Amino acid sequence: AQSVAQPEDQVNVAEGNPLTVKCTYSVSGNPYLFWYVQYPNRGLQFLLKYITGDNLVKGSYGFEAEFNKSQTSFHLKKPSALVSDSALYFCAVQRSNDYKLSFGAGTTVTVRA
Amino acid sequence: DAGITQSPRHKVTETGTPVTLRCHQTENHRYMYWYRQDPGHGLRLIHYSYGVKDTDKGEVSDGYSVSRSKTEDFLLTLESATSSQTSVYFCAIRGIGGANTGELFFGEGSRLTVL
């Protein structure tokens, strides 16, 4: 079995401040990890993924995430948040020998001007 | 644009009626998925397909069936809709030639309301 926990339903930050969205996972074997963003009434858009290699992954729109195997975490970060980053963010995990992706419940990010 | 079209985009139906949602892709991808999105649950996998006539169950497959008679179309059927199946349904395809390292690309969603 595999699962993802996003411990915060909501994250609120001021524009220009750092943004962190937390994610922890549970999976047997090596994990593949993904972050997606969803804007209102839209489908999910891919932000970044960790497959192997460097634990720090850089993705779209200035986002990055760090894979921490010992803490089974894959937190999403952005050094300076924008109002346009306000959206619903999903973390997802997959076993390296599988094709099924499991998603967390999502974290709503609000960036205030 | 990943070339995914879902239809219908919105549907209201009554309990006990059959409903079919269609996912059409133009990219010739092998892997296709159906998820449902509900508040507090994120996205949950219903069924997925790894080729024509090859499908497998996800974590919430009860009450749903799927069919894939050609590469470009993946159909999700609710044989007898229930109110618990009111949800937003998303189709997805896997990129990068179908390798399991590829990310999923999602359609715009189909909002289903069962009265």
Image: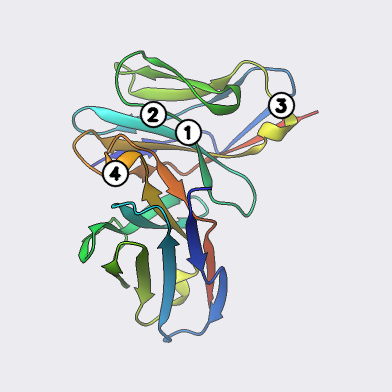
Q: Chain of mark 4?
A: B
Mark 2 in CB contact with mark 4 (< 8 angstroms): no
| Pointer 3 residue | A82
Q: Is residue B40 above or below residue A10?
A: below
Question: Between disc 3 and disc 1, whose residue precedes?
Answer: 1
Secondary element type, mark 2: strand
**Quadrant of the drawing holding the C terminus of chain B:** bottom right
Question: Between disc 2 and disc 3, whose residue precedes?
Answer: 2
Q: Residues within 10 Å of mark 1 (few under 14, many from 20)?
A: some
Secondary element type, mark 1: loop
Amino acid type of the residue tagged 3 in the rendering = Leu
Counting from the top left corner in percent of width and height, residue B14 is at 51, 85
Q: CA distance from mark 4 to mark 1?
A: 31 Å
Mark 2 in CB contact with mark 1 (< 8 angstroms): yes
| Pointer 2 residue | A24
Amino acid type of the residue tagged 4 in the rendering = Gly
| Pointer 4 residue | B98
